[in-house]
Image (cartoon, coloured by chain):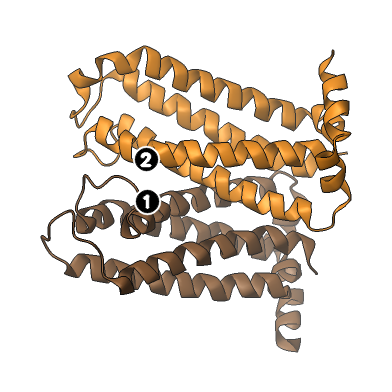
Amino acid sequence: MTLHSLAAALQDTAAGRFVAVSAWAFPTLEALHVLCLTTVFGTVALVDLRLMGLAFRDRRITALSAEVLPFTWAAFAGALLTGSLLLSSQATVYLANPAFRWKMLMLALAGLNMMVFHLVTWRRVQAWDGRRDPPFAVRIAGLVSMALWIGVVVFGRWIGFTLQ
Amino acid sequence: MQAIALFCNWLGATPLSQTLQSVSWIVPTVQSIHIVGIAMVVAPTILLNMRLLGVGGKSQPIPRLFASLMPVVWCALLALVISGALLIIAEPKRELLNIVFQTKMALLIGDVASTAGLQRWAASKGPSPAQDAPPPGARAAALLSLILFVAIIGCGRWIAYVQ
């Protein structure tokens, strides 16, 4: 079971073949994908700006996160669903596209960064929750997060320009 | 429409337009900036409108929420106008002569107007309790704003598919 054979199987599904042949399905899924990914990026950015001490410095980090992250998760689920359907239209072609592979790598690293932050750094959040200038490790987490998500957006855009 | 077509011909021939068209990485980069700008409008707007519709956390009074998030929206809108202008200059006919683009602009004007109205309303509420249920007018405006920007984003993507 190689990645290539998985991709071939995906594009052979009913959904994959439908998106590939329908005139309106792909653009509609793309528009929904943009809506979801901009919501993910924007909500993550609001939290990252706070983590970096650049905005909303009067708000407790825990309070801001609690308000924002449910929207992030809902939008991410939507992005994953729409993205998978877009991918299924020609999965083998996307798999061979360098920009697509870089985007997946950025996505994985962004997820990893968030996991490390929540499992490690977040454990001592009460110590710096209300600080206008969070500790260095927290600010770096915010910066890395922003850089990786910008990478996801940039490589995502490049897919369209480099698809064979 | 003749005047717009003539304007597009003139714009497309300018040195700036020629440069934007010929250097391959410029348009994708400006588009990426445009997407980031969209994100920085969408996220605060969703939070604000959902709050008015009674969804989401209520730890902050509505006027405070508006006061802290609207500056992000207006800065992002500025970035969108600049990046959008560059995209138009790079490919004038693709945008200005496109009915989907024209629709997007009309919807955008409507959305900016309704958002500005909501912001004025929120600012006038003064130090009201956080749990104040917004009046039906504000909730309708919030729902309209959400529908409008979903439509705007849809139009944005569909420009590429309609000519």
Task: Say which residue appears at 32% left-offset and 40% top-offset.
Answer: A67
Badge 1 vs badge 2, beta-carbon distance below 8 Å: yes
Q: Observer-nearest residue: A69 or B23?
A: A69
The residue to which callout 1 is attached is: B47
- Which chain is painted in orange? A
Residue drawn 32% across and 55% down?
A: B54
- Circle 1 marks a residue in which chain? B
From the top left corner, tell me how far across and down residue A28 is, in percent.
71, 55
Q: Quadrant of residue A70?
A: top left
Vertical side of A44 occupied by B80: above or below:
below
Image side of residue B71 versus residue A112, left or right: left
Q: Is residue B30 visible?
A: no
Circle 2 sits on which residue?
A: A68
Label 1 to label 2: alpha-carbon separation: 8 Å
Q: Spot the brown chain and give its letter.
A: B
User: Nearest the camera: B138 or B66?
Assistant: B138
